[in-house]
Amino acid sequence: MTSAMLQQQRSRTVVVEWLPLLDYPYTSIRTLGEGTYGTVTLEVLSTDVDAYRRGDDKVPRFAVKRFKVAADEDEDAVAADATREVRNLMLLKKSGGACDTGVACLIDHFIDERDGLYVLVTRFEPGVTLRQLSANNDKRRFTVDGGQLRRILRSALAGLRYMHAHDVVHRDIKDDNLIVQNYGTASVHVVYLDPGLGCVDRADCVAQNVSVEVYLSPELLTRRLHNTGADATLAEFKAADVWTLALVVRGVNGAPFPYQEKQFELLNALKLEYAAAAQRVERVRIALALRVAHDVQQKQQQLQREQRRHTELATRLRQQHLAALTDMAAQQRTVFADRQLTVLDSSLYFTGPLLSEPSGDSTSNEVLGKMLRFNWRQRLSPLAGMMLLDRRTAQDPQRLAPLELDALVALAAHCSNGFVLSRVTSAAAGTSANNEISVLE
């Protein structure tokens, strides 16, 4: 068995082993998603197909992700990506193998002997993605009411707190990776999907320097511009997750993105052009190597032209990339720097149909504003955000409940995970009763 068929990765006592499965036990029902990584399908056990088709809602359902190897990809690289995702899901399991309800639940992983593909099986999470919810808002002209959005935000913060407590940084939070369950009810719940880009410690996060750039937090964007990413701390990566979650939740009711994406649209178009040029170079090289070209000299000249074009595009791509990141950093600073916002004022954003209260709920706006503080050390932690939402919901803005205060003080004393809660006071201690939960150095 080759290294591509069997790969082990040891991290924090977790061993990921890929073994071939001879008898595939599932039957595909429908495709859930498809991308460059491969496909995700809804499947049930083959023994449960008849019951599922009869409408038995107790039949276990699974989301099966199949990692495909593209023509220009190395199989070992695909195996490493699949292994990383499995490792993260294993680390997120509770003692005894139980899964938290706020994150995807790993069921199995193996190599399908029928086609040699790496397969990842997780519990199917019914519901709608946050993107679908936002798309419905645009189409049906309704907004998520304040109570619902507050519950969505709190549930998302709870899931993020769980991941960070296990030192797993998601790194790929976006509206497609958040499933909203029981929407419209008091038990609305959020589940995080696809932690494949996640990292588990500082060294791993630095090595896995991949994330959706348009969602980059100011501190990680600055590091990328100045090539100082190797100095980033685990706390910075966790704070970046908080930043991204706030940007995503703000979009539920159509709040504008805090900076224009035109530069990134140009960059993506250039990336496609660059990839096409690379493919043309490779095709000519193959023709020459196999000596199938009728005119070798002409093909050699063509190869030289394509290589020059490829080099020119590589230079343009680097320049455009730098321009996009620089422009984004300038816009971030314009909007967020030196502003301690409790409500994200639409006047700070670009032209268009703007909302002065993007979430439709003042309490959610307050929490989102604190999650989007420019200085990551002052950014709200997931636990502090949950407590602030609970405190406002309980209509007791003057002081924390004793249990909450004890939890905050305990967390403030435990700063090894990066976030420290301070300025927590209580009337009982003889200080100001108007407490502010903040994240400080």
Image: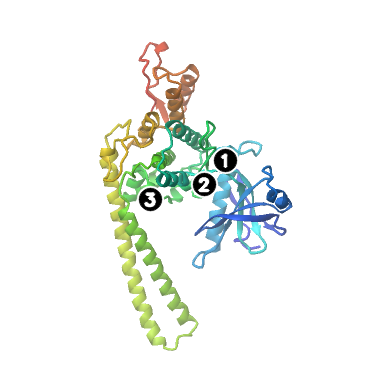
For disc 2, the marked residue is: 195
**Are the residues flagged by discs 2 and 1 in contact, CB closer than 8 Å?**
yes
- x and y percent of residue 415 in the render? 45, 30
Residue at the location (34% across, 65% down)? 314
Tag 1's secondary structure? loop
For disc 3, the marked residue is: 213
Tag shown at residue 298: none
The kind of residue tagged 1 is Leu
The kind of residue tagged 2 is Pro
> Is residue 7 in view?
no
For disc 1, the marked residue is: 92
Whichever of callouts 3 and 1 sits on the residue coming sooner in the sequence is 1
Q: Classify 350 as above or below 119.
A: above
What is the crowding at mark 3: few (fewer than 14 residues within 10 Å), some, or many (at least 20)? some
The kind of residue tagged 3 is Glu
Residue at the location (38% across, 34% down)? 360
Residue at the location (42% across, 50% down)? 211
Whichever of callouts 2 and 1 sits on the residue coming sooner in the sequence is 1
- x and y percent of residue 86 in the render? 58, 49
> Is residue 349 in view?
yes
